[in-house]
Amino acid sequence: MTRRVLSLVLAQLNMNFAISHSRYYYLKKRQRLWEPVLIVLGIGGAAAMLAIGIYTAASYYYSAAAAVGQGAVTLTLGILLSQVLVLILGFVLVIAVFYFSNDLGILIPFPLRPAEVLVSKFAVILANEYVGLAVFIVPVLVAYGVRAGVSAVPYVVSSVLVFLALPVVPLVLAAIPAILLMRVVGLSRRKDTLAMIGGFLFIAVVVVFQFLVQTKAPGVGEEAEFLAKMLATADSLVDIVGARFPPSIWATKALALSGTWQGLLNLGIFLAVGALGFVALLAIGDRVFYQGVLSGFEAGATRGARRVGKVRAATYVSRSPVVSLAVAEMKLFTRTPVFVLNGFTGFVIFPVMLVAMFFVRSTPEMARLWDALFAIPGLAAIGTLVIAGYFFILTAMSSIPFTAFSREGRRNIWIPRSFPATGKTVALGKAVGAEIMIALGAIPGVAVLEYLVRLPVLSVVAGIILGIMSSFVLCVCGVLFDMWRPMLNWTDQQKAVKSNLNVVAGMLVGVGVVGLLGVAVSFFIKLGFPAWGIVAGVAGVLAILLAALMKLLGTIADKLWSALEI
Amino acid sequence: MSEVALLRLEGVSKTYRGGTRPAVDNLSLEVRAGEIFGFLGPNGAGKTTTIKMVVGLLKADRGTILVNGHDVARDSVAAKADIGYVPDNPDLYDRLTGIEYLNLVADIFGVPRDERRRRVAELLEMFELESAARDIIQSYSHGMKQKLALTGALLHEPRVFILDEPMVGLDPRASRLFKDMMRSHCDKGHTVFFSTHILEVAERLCDRVGIINRGRLVACGTVEELRNRRKQADETLEDIFLELTEAGEAS
Ligand SMILES: Nc1ncnc2c1ncn2[C@@H]1O[C@H](COP(=O)(O)OP(=O)(O)OP(=O)(O)O)[C@@H](O)[C@H]1O
Ligand SMILES: [Mg+2]
């Protein structure tokens, strides 16, 4: 029993981290050796920079909090934020890995209990979470350890245990609703749609919840006033911040009091709750996990006779190849729950966050922030730029254009390749499809913004036009980038859209460009340029970029397309 | 031939969710120890659906399926432990090497170390896969993947060997080997249950055949029996197949 599970877990981890795969290509076949080196350097560098940034912030936060004898709140916040992150991302990950892995057709005929398969899949998610979490929480743990002058051995031991147990509770909290959701939607004809809606609802709830917790915590810079108030109520800040999610208190005490009986007790509670949650997940999973998976094997509604008329109608429609490709791109994307849950998350999170922010306006700090916002001179023109920037950021975060070819995967990429279409046509089709999805996805955010800030219609319309232009530039670039280096060898759909370096590159470029533009715009405003003049300037630059891109597209795309080896 | 039924389906039905008519309709059949059973039928007849229900990839709406006496619905782990299954399109773990995949399967089916070593060596040699075994599966051809899937399914000497269209993609030598292997597997007292469209193979190889059309079993027995039942002793299996499945279409 244990041997079976262990073997399964090891095989899953091997595939997840592509260990044999890399060994084969890089060591045995000696292919593209520069590639792993570059990847390790790039990711390692970015991770190190991020870690240093977090370390600095945590140290700074610690000094401020320690001044009022509340240093441990640094740990609470770090732990709480990591757990919320795991919770939000975990839900989608659980649905993708538990229900849409390619290997389920192999695993289910094996003589394994559902819980055993669940363990192996859970281990894969956990392993991925550890990699990500290491960058976020280890700097916080180190910063606290260094600044608080803890005794090394017990602190390190507790830290390692807390780190290992950290993602378990939030993942269980994400996995249990996910499993139940998939069980329930499996009963319905429209199970894919329902799974997507359920997923977004869950994310929205967690974002709102996280906001409520966070508004209880002080931001850096206003802690003195806040702490004074808190201390007056004689409650420990740690307890207040963690009250909405107690595991973060236990973890904090386990660390801050490491080496004492009380620390040990809290560590014990923290680990026990994780273990209990895991056991509960297995108990529930053993009953309902397979039912959800099996219903996924059945294609949704086939409506028999009523289809006939539609078939005839469909065969007579002829469109331009770009339009057909764009329509196909949208259909393929929106009908794949894993793609939608990953790619459309930003469309949901931003408006929900805006609304949540608006409703906590009652706290004085937030009200001040809003007032400051309304008082900005040239708000209408800046609103236009903000909307355009929102489109751009959504495009960068959505991963849609950056995975246009990766998503086809090794199994399907031959289909567009065998079409009698030029690279330019294919790239344009994919970019247009991506653009339409993103533009539609941006509507809720823009609507909420408009409702809250009440921008003039002109600036909203101008913002949308600029937004579509800017986002389309990024779409075309993203599609070309993915045509150059598609990641076709994925083991499940989640990998195609999440563990894809093209996506990371897109996000970095997107955030970088918006950041630079933001700096440039505020610089021009300081210089006294009229705000609408800046808008016109941005529009001009975008128009030139678009024209140049269209001109270049023919040669670049055709070359990349014919160079793409499958 | 022994009379023990290693695989038994009783009144099994399945309608896909949203489907208008059952993909498998009240199907009953029995495969005994030492028997090769050929499962025939036109495209979309319900062969793959039936096989998937037996191996646990689909749940039957009605009826019971017993594998070596274990109810697939209630005692699925025990039932699966007695099955070796090769799907119609063997999508294996692209990112594992052949050996890693076989070890995984052997671990899960609890094949002891010595036996594992012996059987892996034997099967890999037979399928001429030894040199490829240490490469990742992604680098295999279609037929190589299929041979690896066959190897994995045979490692634990399954009582019931279930194959969905096993001949597709095998070269003549491999398909010959494979046919011999099915025979010797049955001679050990196990059974083979496979679906196919190649009627000559079914006619020569199978102890009994079942013909399914639109989800219903329209004939079942030895080829000889089917012929006699139709009172036309010179008919080939192909003639019988075409007549039976055409009749089903009309009704
Ligand atoms: N995943 C699925 N979801 C919905 N309906 C399905 C699914 N798979 C098969 N069907 C339907 O079930 C019926 C039987 O299909 P099945 O795959 O069992 O046929 P088959 O006998 O294996 O055919 P073939 O010889 O083509 O492999 C068909 O009508 C098919 O449309
Ligand atoms: Mg079939």
Image (cartoon, rainbow, N blue to C red):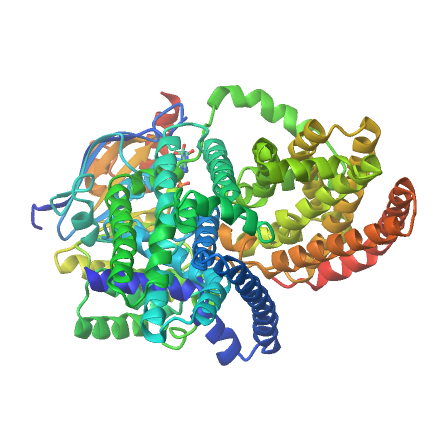
**Residue A216 falls left or right of residue A352:** left
Residues B32 and A51: in front is A51
Quadrant of the rendering where the C terminus of chain B is positioned: top left
Picture quadrant of ligand 2: top left
Quadrant hosting residue A47: bottom right
**Residue B215 falls left or right of residue A526:** left
**Residue B57 falls left or right of residue A36:** left
**Residue A30 falls left or right of residue A169:** right
Residues A67 and A2: in front is A67
Residues A130 and A76: in front is A76
Vertical arrangement, residue A9 with respect to residue B1, above or below: below
For the image, the number of numbered tags is 0
Residue A343: image x %, image y %? 58, 45
Q: Which residue reaches farthest front?
A: A232
Residue A298: image x %, image y %? 39, 36
Examine the rendering and report whether any part of residue B138 can be seen. yes
What's the residue at 28%, 39% (across, down)? A288
Examine the rendering and report whether any part of residue A547 can be seen. no
What's the residue at 34%, 41% (across, down)? A176
Residues A153 and B20: in front is A153
What's the residue at 87%, 48% (across, down)? A525
Quadrant hosting residue A56: bottom right
Residue A137: image x %, image y %? 47, 61
Vertical arrangement, residue B18 with respect to residue A566, above or below: above
Residue A540: image x %, image y %? 90, 46
